[in-house]
Amino acid sequence: METPGSPGRPSAALETSGSPGRPSAALETSGSPERPSAGAPAPVRAAFAEGVPAGTIPAQVGAAVGQAVPRARVPAAQRREELIAAAVHEFAQGGLHGTPVERIARRVGVAQPYVFSLFGSKRELFLAALERSFEQVANTFERAAAEYREGRAPEECEDALMAMGRAYKELLLSDRDYLMLQHQSYAACDDEVVRERVRHRYARLVGLAQRLSGAEDDRIDDFFRHGMALNVAAALGVEDLSSGCSWVRAELDRLGDSSTG
């Protein structure tokens, strides 16, 4: 496919003529936009015979014959959402300080400098992921409260707060990334900026639970204490954290130590 005397240079059949990025005549359709020209490569004519629209064939075949095909431009807003989703997963695994931005960029298929064009720093990207995590919990509370008001909550839920607690437990079991990102957010609170954001979002959750349930302060306090215990239990892969539960006793027996010290 190379021309004599010019290593690495594509043959004339694959070169563009006059217009950079424009496919050669051999890959273009001519006359009718519905049918490839008679001089089109065999793969083009075969694809047309199988029902592939002629207008899309050159881009599909270009990569196969070694010709660069321009990539569709993805809007920055879409890339931002993709990067936040990737950051939720990666930061859930490695935390703020243990996660290279390059790993998040690779997960989305972009270069690291592009990430920093949308997020000024790794901390800013971490904060965006943290915000997404708290939003997920808030959305879970709102949806559960609405289902209770509409009579669609499980029968065992006696009020909106119980419905919210049940929905939160299901969230922890269904999406481990959001669970582990919560733990990573608290672990990163040595960073003053992260600590301030976590406090703010936690306080907003408390206010939301109060507003949706109308519960007294004591019940709200118990609700969040129980929620924190659920976080730990879910991270450990257990359902009970009591001192007499089966897995705690089994661990103590395995160590040959029946004391709590």
Image (cartoon, rainbow, N blue to C red):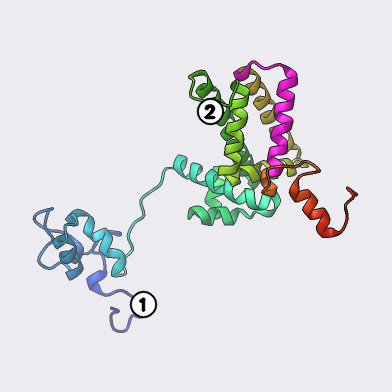
Callout 1 environment at 10 Å: few (<14), some (14 to 19), or many (20+)? few
Q: Nearer the viewer, residue 135 or 174?
A: 174
The vertical placement of 232 against 154, above or below, is below
Residue drawn at (71%, 23%) of the image: 220
Q: Classify the position of the N terminus by image quarter.
A: bottom left
On the image, the x and y values in percent for residue 239 come to 68, 43
**Where is mark 1, residue-wise?**
8
Residue drawn at (48%, 19%) of the image: 150
On the image, the x and y values in percent for residue 102 come to 58, 56
Given contact means CB atoms under 8 Å apart, are the residues at marks 1 and 2 in contact? no
How far apart in space, not on screen, are marks 1 and 2 (Cα)? 68 Å
User: Quadrant of the rendered structure where residue 54 is?
Assistant: bottom left
Residue drawn at (87%, 59%) of the image: 256
Q: Which residues are magenta?
A: 212-233
Earlier in the chain: of badge 1 and badge 2, it is 1
The amino acid at mark 1 is Gly
User: Quadrant of the rendered structure where residue 59 is?
Assistant: bottom left
Callout 2 environment at 10 Å: few (<14), some (14 to 19), or many (20+)? few
The vertical placement of 15 against 156, above or below, is below
- Label number found at residue 154: 2
On the image, the x and y values in percent for residue 97 come to 70, 51
Q: Secondary structure at mark 2?
A: loop
